[in-house]
């Protein structure tokens, strides 16, 4: 009888131990599932991060290309401004020369008229 009681107690003890382990195993299974979900989420985030890095690199490359285009446009603009300033200066010189020619023409006409008047008076 003692031996049967001892065996029964041992079996109860083992059953209790198994019951105690079952929630741990369930917790470990749940923990493992959570770990797997977190790993999947981390991989997804890493993929998004890698994609964002590629996009940033592409944007930086595009930005450099646009900056180069802008520098070229600014250089062309500055060249056109200088060209326009030179043309304006040439135009001002031509206007000044034209005024001098007009003054000379007016002076010549006046001189010719005076000479003509003198000639007419001399003829009389």
Image: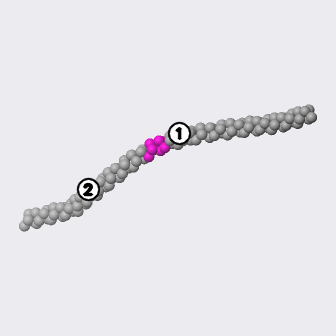
- Name the residue beneath numbered marker 2: 32
Specify the label residue 122 is tagged with.
Answer: none
Disc nearer the start of the sequence (1/2): 2
Asked if the magenta segment contains residue 61, the reply would be yes
Residues marked 1 and 2 touching at CB (< 8 Å): no
Q: Quadrant of the C terminus?
A: top right
Main secondary structure type of the part rendered in magenta:
helix
- Seen at 59% across and 38% down, the residue is 79
- Seen at 56% across and 41% down, the residue is 74
Judging depth in this view, the residue of 72 and 119 nearest the camera is 119
Q: Residues within 10 Å of mark 2 (few under 14, many from 20)?
A: few
- Seen at 45% across and 44% down, the residue is 62
Left or right of residue 121: residue 11: left
Q: Quadrant of the N terminus?
A: bottom left
Left or right of residue 30: residue 13: left
- Seen at 18% across and 61% down, the residue is 18
Residue 39 shows in this picture: yes
Q: CA distance from mark 1 to mark 2?
A: 60 Å
Judging depth in this view, the residue of 57 and 12 nearest the camera is 57
Asked if the magenta segment contains residue 28, the reply would be no
Judging depth in this view, the residue of 15 and 37 nearest the camera is 37
Left or right of residue 62: residue 27: left
Q: Residues within 10 Å of mark 1 (few under 14, many from 20)?
A: few
Q: Residue furthest left?
A: 1
Provide the secondary structure element on which disc 2 rests.
helix
* Magenta extent: 59-66
Provide the secondary structure element on which disc 1 rests.
helix
Nearer the observer: mark 1 or 2; the answer is 1
Specify the label residue 72 is tagged with.
Answer: 1
Q: Position of residue 114 (x, y in %)?
A: 87, 36
């Amino acid at each position: 009888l003692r031996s049967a009681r001892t065996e029964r107690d041992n079996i109860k003890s083992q059953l209790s131990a198994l019951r105690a382990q079952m929630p741990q195993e369930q917790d470990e299974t749940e923990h493992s599932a959570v770990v797997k979900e977190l790993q999947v989420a981390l991989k997804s985030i890493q993929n998004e991060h890698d994609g964002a890095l590629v996009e940033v690199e592409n944007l930086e490359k595009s930005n450099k290309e646009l900056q180069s285009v802008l520098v070229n446009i600014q250089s062309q603009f500055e060249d056109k401004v200088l060209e326009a300033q030179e043309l304006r200066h040439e135009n001002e010189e031509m206007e000044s020369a034209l005024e001098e020619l007009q003054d000379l023409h007016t002076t010549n006409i006046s001189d010719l008229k005076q000479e003509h008047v003198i000639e007419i008076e001399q003829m009389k």
